[in-house]
Image: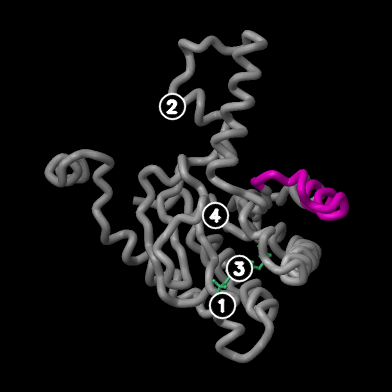
Amino acid sequence: MTIQHIAIIMDGNGRWATKRKRPRTFGHQAGVKTVRSSIETCVKLGVPNLTLFAFSSENWSRPAKEVQRLMDLFMRSLSKETPELLKQGVQQNFIGDLSQFSPKLQQKMSDVAAMHPEKFVMNLNIAVNYGGKWDLAQAAQKLCADVREQNISVEHINESTFGSYLSLADQPPVDLLIRTGGEHRISNFLLWQIAYAEIFFEDVLWPDFNADELLRVIDQFHSRERRFGQTSEQVNCKEN
Ligand code: FPP
């Protein structure tokens, strides 16, 4: 089965740096290299959608200096990486409540999202100030506004119509969700979109999650049986 969508919770930058007696920001900088190699691997494999959790709605509560450094790194990375990403056929999209960022960063994200590669290969969705609960709440808000304006009737609300109000509505659901850094939780990342994702919790810290590690996880993903509620016999019968 080909993979349509990979999502990654990139965890472990801080611990990676602390282990080396360096400031946490050093870990985030090292993390950018892994972001680059993961994108390259997905492009090479022809995975059409990759979603990265870069900054959660809860990350604002980190020390102000770390938040500021992350914003600076994000801004710099967007300027530096975008030309090469466009060459590779990568379309960048940003999901989350973007209104909380500085006007300069908001403008940057809007400019970058408006740059389309000549030949599309992959959507790179960067989740910033994103929370799965926020996504569901904003979808409900928009849907209710549409009901009020009589664009949709209550009877027509179903999984498909509700889903169309969520972030990434135009992309297939997540097949494979990876979290590095050893923690076994979703941390309010995509909720609806991972309903049937295969989840891999990896102990390796994000800066050490190189292309070989990603290929190993993808290999393991292919050996899992995805039943979507059916029995093993039904699934195997369909495949034969
Ligand atoms: C989690 O590690 C990582 C983050 C909160 C930031 C992730 C950002 C990057 C990898 C760099 C910028 C990204 C882009 C897309 C340019 P942590 O700090 O929570 O690590 P810890 O659990 O060891 O403390």
Is disc 2 surrounded by few (<14), some (14 to 19) or many (20+) residues within 10 Å?
Answer: few
For mark 2, give the secondary structure: helix
Q: Is residue 49 above or below residue 76?
A: above
Q: Residue at x 52, y 80 (%)?
A: 208
Q: Would residue 196 be counted in the magenta stretch?
A: no
Image location of residue 73, percent across then percent down: 75, 69
Query: Main structural element of the magenta stretch: helix, strand or loop?
Result: helix
Q: Residue at x 63, y 25 (%)?
A: 142
Please state which amino acid type lies under the numbered disc 2.
Glu
Q: Return the disc, 2 or 1, that comes first in the chain's sequence.
A: 2
Q: Would residue 106 be counted in the magenta stretch?
A: yes
Image location of residue 185, percent across then percent down: 42, 59
Say left or right for 218 vs 224. right
Instruction: Determine which residue is flagged by label 4.
Output: 50
Q: How many marks?
A: 4
Determine the residue located farthest toward the bottom in the rendered image: 21
Range covered by the magenta-colored residues: 95-110
Q: Nearer the viewer, mark 4 or mark 1?
A: 1
Locate ligand 1 by image quadrant: bottom right
Please state which amino acid type lies under the numbered disc 1.
Pro
Instruction: Determine which residue is flagged by label 2.
Output: 159
Q: Residue at x 41, y 55 (%)?
A: 176
Instruction: Determine which residue is flagged by label 3.
Output: 35
Q: Return the disc, 2 or 4, that comes first in the chain's sequence.
A: 4
Q: Return the disc, 3 or 1, that comes first in the chain's sequence.
A: 3
For mark 3, give the secondary structure: helix
Instruction: Determine which residue is flagged by label 1.
Output: 207
Q: Quadrant of residue 61?
A: bottom right
Q: Return the disc, 2 or 3, that comes first in the chain's sequence.
A: 3
Label 3 beta carbon within 8 A of ligand 1: yes
User: Disc 4 and disc 1: Cα gap in Å?
Assistant: 18 Å
